[in-house]
């Protein structure tokens, strides 16, 4: 079975687990993992199901998982986020997803993002394009000033807020709108299919963004860190946008955040 097919199968299985738990969480099922960051039974069950599917077909592949840590194997690495948008999930907001990205050596080669309650699945393979529910998608052709952009607040480091807010203000004053959805993987997928024109955020984890990075690139967009390089998986600082909007979004983000982050 192809890698992307296994990723789809794993994401679908995890999605059913998340749907089962949604709106049924009790207080004892949510434990504090770190400030402003929670883990639930849904996370761990969904992640276990994903890993089981991967190991059934590719037992020698490496896995980097949010809850379970790192399983060392060969040059294939799977980046797994079983529940991106945990805070939304806990509060009953159905805007969350499963994200699975696969890297071979230093190159992203496959990605799957499943949004359970919207019944949407995004897939991407290196050199084959990006698909939304089986239909090929492309990034937006809108101009920067006409665009709708997404961002995420620096919830893992609120000390960054004073640096972030001037950047937010300048983008806000130059585009048609900004949304903060609370799930970076969905923001990236929606940028890939042209709903959003671009996205930026600080301090993300590689499992948050690996799948979405490939989706934007395969849909004709551009992805970088705040300095214009490709260290986003290491730094967690990412800009992803359509080719029409990338340069202007990058210029603003780089001016405010590039020297520090």
Image (cartoon, helix red, strand yellow):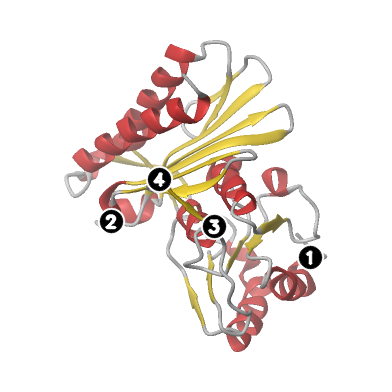
Report how far apart the C-alphas of labels 4 and 2 lie in the structure. Answer: 22 Å
- Foreground: 78 or 30? 78
Q: Residue at x 80, y 53 (%)?
A: 229
Q: Name above or below for residue 259 compared with residue 132.
A: below
Neighbourhood count class around disc 3 (C-alpha, 10 Å): few under 14, some 14–19, many 20 upward: many
Where residue 63 sits in the image (x, y, percent)? 56, 24
Mark 4 lies on residue:
134
Tell us which disc is closer to us: 1 or 3: 3
Report how far apart the C-alphas of labels 1 and 3 lie in the structure. Answer: 23 Å
Q: Secondary structure at mark 3?
A: helix
Earlier in the chain: of badge 3 and badge 4, it is: 4
89 to the left or right of 200: left
Neighbourhood count class around disc 2 (C-alpha, 10 Å): few under 14, some 14–19, many 20 upward: some
Report how far apart the C-alphas of labels 2 and 3 lie in the structure. Answer: 21 Å
Mark 3 lies on residue:
192
- Foreground: 85 or 35? 85
Mark 1 lies on residue:
258
Report how far apart the C-alphas of labels 1 and 4 lie in the structure. Answer: 37 Å
- In the rendering, which numbered label is found on residue 94? 2
Earlier in the chain: of badge 1 and badge 4, it is: 4
| Circle 1/circle 4 CB separation < 8 Å | no
Tell us which disc is closer to us: 3 or 4: 4
Q: Secondary structure at mark 1?
A: helix
Q: Secondary structure at mark 4?
A: loop
């Amino acid at each position: 079975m192809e890698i992307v097919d296994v990723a789809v199968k794993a994401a679908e299985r995890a999605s059913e687990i998340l749907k089962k738990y949604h709106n049924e969480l009790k207080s004892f099922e949510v434990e504090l993992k770190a400030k402003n960051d929670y883990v639930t039974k849904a996370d761990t069950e969904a992640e276990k199901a994903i890993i089981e599917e991967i190991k059934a077909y590719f037992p020698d592949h490496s896995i980097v998982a949010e809850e379970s840590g790192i399983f060392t194997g060969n040059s294939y690495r799977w980046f797994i986020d079983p529940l991106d948008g945990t805070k939304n999930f806990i509060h009953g907001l159905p805007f969350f997803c499963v994200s699975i990205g696969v890297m071979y050596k230093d190159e992203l080669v496959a990605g799957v993002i499943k949004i359970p309650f919207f019944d949407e699945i995004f897939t991407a393979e290196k050199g084959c394009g990006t698909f939304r529910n089986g239909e090929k998608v492309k990034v937006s052709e809108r101009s920067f000033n006409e665009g709708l952009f997404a961002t995420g607040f620096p919830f893992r480091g609120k000390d960054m807020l004073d640096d972030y807010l001037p950047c937010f203000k300048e983008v806000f004053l130059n585009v048609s709108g900004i949304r903060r959805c609370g799930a970076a993987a969905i923001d990236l997928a929606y940028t890939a299919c042209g709903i959003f024109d671009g996205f930026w955020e600080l301090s993300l984890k590689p499992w948050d963004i690996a799948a979405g990075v490939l989706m934007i690139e395969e849909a004709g967009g551009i992805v970088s860190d705040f300095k214009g390089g490709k260290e986003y998986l290491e730094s967690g600082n990412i800009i992803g946008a359509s080719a029409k909007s990338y340069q202007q979004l990058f210029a603003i983000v780089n001016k405010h955040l590039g020297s520090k982050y």
